Image: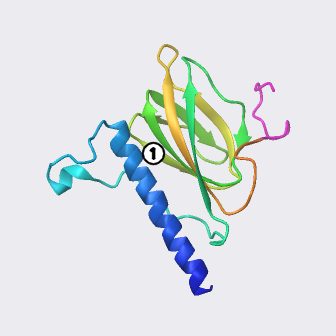
Amino acid sequence: MSFHRKWIGVAAAILCTGLVAAHFAWSQGAAPNARSGSQDRARIVFSQPLPKLDGGHLKVTLVEVRYGPGEASLPHSHPCAVIGYVVEGAIRTQVKGEPEMTYKAGESFYEAPNGVHLVSANASATEPAKLVAYLICDHDTPLSVDVSESIRPKGVAR
């Protein structure tokens, strides 16, 4: 790998880390110039190795996803790596081959590229939920792709 591509990869990793830290601080209502102890200022919320990416075409996209009480998305796939951060409420999620999980406000999760997202739903029937999805791509592609009828779990309509 050339020096230029390595530099771009390092710069992209630093940018992603900064965006995640800034979003976490913003969502917690922290003032950027707050004078507190360094241990109170920042903490690692989530860490995940990323798949091999082409450093010459990296792009990070942040998507805010809101679910009303009881709402859910149809099964879909993301061609890029996804880091989800729950801002409000609780989210139920399941990628094909993995157990269903529930993440609450302040928690994060990872989805590998092209995983089939069978469940993405508000865990509450009475309260709204919101998450921010950080999609890390190295090529131009739609952020979300519907899955074919043959992959959908039984009982899930289009």
Q: Is residue 151 magenta?
A: yes
For this view, does 105 lie left or right of residue 116? left
**Residue 47 appears in the figure:** no
Q: Position of residue 52 (x, y in %)?
A: 62, 70
Query: In the image, is residue 51 above or below residue 110?
Result: below
Report the residue marked by disc 1. 108
Of residue 80 and residue 25, the one placed in the foreground of this image is 25
| Rendered position, 157 above or below 18 | above
- Amino acid residing under circle 1: Ser
- Quadrant that contains the C terminus: top right
Q: Is disc 1 surrounded by few (<14), some (14 to 19) or many (20+) residues within 10 Å?
A: some
Percent position of residue 126, x then y: 49, 13
Residue drawn at the location 20% of the way across and 49% of the way down: 40
Q: Which residue is at 49% across, 26% downward?
A: 129
Whether 40 is among the magenta residues is no
Q: Which residues are magenta?
A: 146-158
Q: How is the image coloured?
A: rainbow
The residue most toward the front is: 33
Residue at position x 46%, y 29% from top? 90
Predominant secondary structure, magenta span: loop
